[in-house]
């Protein structure tokens, strides 16, 4: 399982980083899964029937010509989630989950942001903090290349 | 795979039927998956980040303490969907997909509604149409019992 956590304080740009790196990885032919934690989420109101079906106690699949959604009662256990969904993908980019054991790329604003983090493989920061490898926040191509090299080396 | 399609014209009460039967089946200890076709659906706006991640080209998992959603680029191919998601469940209730080969319970308003349907195992209707077995629309307990007997007999 090639899983990397993208961690950083809120509004540090985690979603943007993943959003920019995914098309580059896809351009190299990789299948990418992004995992995001949410305090709360709901299906669109336009899908009201699906909401009713879920509330009735069933897990639910909604499917259209373009995409399919599966809503189930799994809790936010990262290992379980990767077990069920991860194997269909070449790389899983996980937003957050800073206390997990997975390798981490840290969006860093100050050196203290590294405290308590295990398995940091790179830092992304526009400060002059001393960490190797370090990438500038907008240098998405270098970050994507680093991720590609990292998962190749772990094969 | 214990899969049954609930078919009928629009507004015939398919969602309501599934919604009422699911808690009865769950009360018997069964794990139930409901599958629904949608012309279009979207994640809630409150989950905007997830929408961005999906648009970037990644498939997406959003997870919270209560539930987990997985949004992927599978198309609406019922066999594929059941292959991936169905095996975790004791029974799959499918709303629609009238042209599939799966056993069907038909919400019937007039006899013509049966034309072209394969593998009809029961009819739900408040008309005096001649079909055996036939259940009244509100007789959810009998319908649930019929479903339980049907899947037991197919084991």
Image (cartoon, coloured by chain):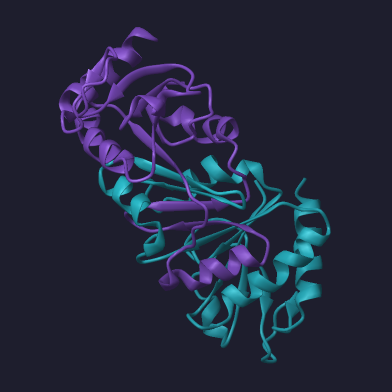
Chain colours: A cyan, B purple
> Residue sitting at 34 percent across and 8 percent down?
B153
> Residue sitting at 49 percent across and 72 percent down?
B48
- In the displayed structure, does residue B151 sit left or right of residue B72? left
Count the numbered circles shown: 0
User: Is A87 above or below relative to B59?
Assistant: above
Image-quadrant location for residue B95? top left
- Look at the image and tell me in which quarter the C terminus of chain B lies: top left
Q: Where is residue A9 in the image (x, y as percent from the top left)?
A: 49, 80
Q: Where is residue B18 in the image (x, y as percent from the top left)?
A: 29, 37
- Between A139 and B104, which is closer to the camera in this rendering? B104
Q: Where is residue A73 in the image (x, y as percent from the top left)?
A: 35, 46
- Between A38 and B126, which is closer to the camera in this rendering? B126
- In the displayed structure, does residue B89 sit left or right of residue A133? left
> Residue sitting at 41 percent across and 65 percent down?
A38
Report if residue A120 is visible in the image. no
Report if residue B78 is visible in the image. yes
- Between A39 and B143, which is closer to the camera in this rendering? B143
Q: Where is residue B132 in the image (x, y as percent from the top left)?
A: 28, 12
Image-quadrant location for residue A114? bottom right
User: Is B118 above or below relative to A122?
Assistant: above
- Between A112 and B109, which is closer to the camera in this rendering? B109
> Residue sitting at 58 percent across and 70 percent down?
B52
């Amino acid at each position: 399982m090639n899983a990397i956590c993208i961690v950083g304080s809120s509004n540090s740009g985690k979603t943007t980083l993943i959003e920019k790196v995914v098309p580059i990885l896809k351009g190299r032919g990789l299948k990418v899964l992004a995992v995001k934690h949410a305090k709360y989420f709901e299906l669109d109101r336009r899908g009201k029937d699906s909401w009713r079906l879920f509330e009735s106690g069933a897990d639910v699949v909604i499917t259209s010509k373009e995409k399919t959604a599966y809503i189930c009662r799994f809790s936010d256990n990262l290992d379980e989630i990767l077990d069920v969904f991860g194997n269909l993908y070449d790389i899983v980019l996980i937003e957050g989950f800073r206390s997990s054991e997975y390798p981490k790329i840290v969006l860093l604003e100050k050196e203290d942001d590294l405290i308590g983090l295990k398995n940091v493989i790179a830092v992304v920061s526009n400060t002059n903090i001393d960490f190797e490898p370090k990438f500038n926040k907008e240098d998405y191509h270098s970050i994507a290349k680093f991720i590609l090299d990292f998962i190749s080396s772990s094969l």
